[in-house]
Amino acid sequence: MGGVSVGVLDHFNIRTRNLAETVRFYEDVLGLEKGARPNFAFPGAWMYSEGKPVVHLVDISPTSEPQKPDSGVVHHVAFASTGFDGMKQRLASKGMKFDSRQVPGGDLWQIFVHDPNGVMIELNYEAAKEQGAAPAEMADDIGKQ
């Protein structure tokens, strides 16, 4: 295809009627930072990780658009992360329900947590770069019905 590439994931967008609560989750729970956003004609926020706006939030509360209950056919959104034990402690200290597991083979550790809109967030950690005890290895699909 001569130099054509989709590239890497840039960001994901959440349309929410709970903007303040959603911003709080991405800031206080996951540690992202609210940052600069273009002067769109609609309210929202951009949440940054390592200098990149990876989560775009659109406030639909001024509209009649209904709040969707979860992420629909998009099952989850994943981040390549660092600090597995620290994130588990952070989530526990904030009373967040989460699941941690090891991908079969042991190279990847994961944490799954839901944002206030029901979007499942997957945090992936390279086992070789992490400290502490490995989580249980799980071969089943998280979040399946």
Image (cartoon, helix red, strand yellow):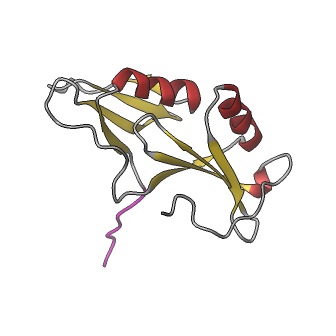
User: Which residue is farthest front?
Assistant: 145
Within the image, what quadrant is residue 14 found in?
top left
Q: Nearer the viewer, residue 86 or 4?
A: 86
Is residue 121 depicted above or below 29 in this figure?
Answer: below
Q: x, y percentage for residue 91? A: 65, 33
**Side of 84 where 121 appears, left or right:** left
Which secondary structure class fits the magenta region best? loop
Q: x, y percentage for residue 90? A: 68, 30
Q: x, y percentage for residue 141? A: 57, 66
Give the residue at x 56% y 24%. 28
Q: Nearer the viewer, residue 57 or 19?
A: 19
Name the quadrant of the N terminus: bottom left
Give the residue at x 38% y 45%. 11
**Side of 110 where 17 appears, left or right:** left
Give the residue at x 57% y 60%. 142
Q: Is residue 49 magenta?
A: no
Within the image, what quadrant is residue 128 found in?
bottom right
- Tell me where the magenta segment starts and ends, as one range: 1-8
Q: x, y percentage for residue 7? A: 39, 60
Give the residue at x 57% y 33%. 30
For the image, the number of numbered tags is 0
**Side of 53 where 103 appears, left or right:** right
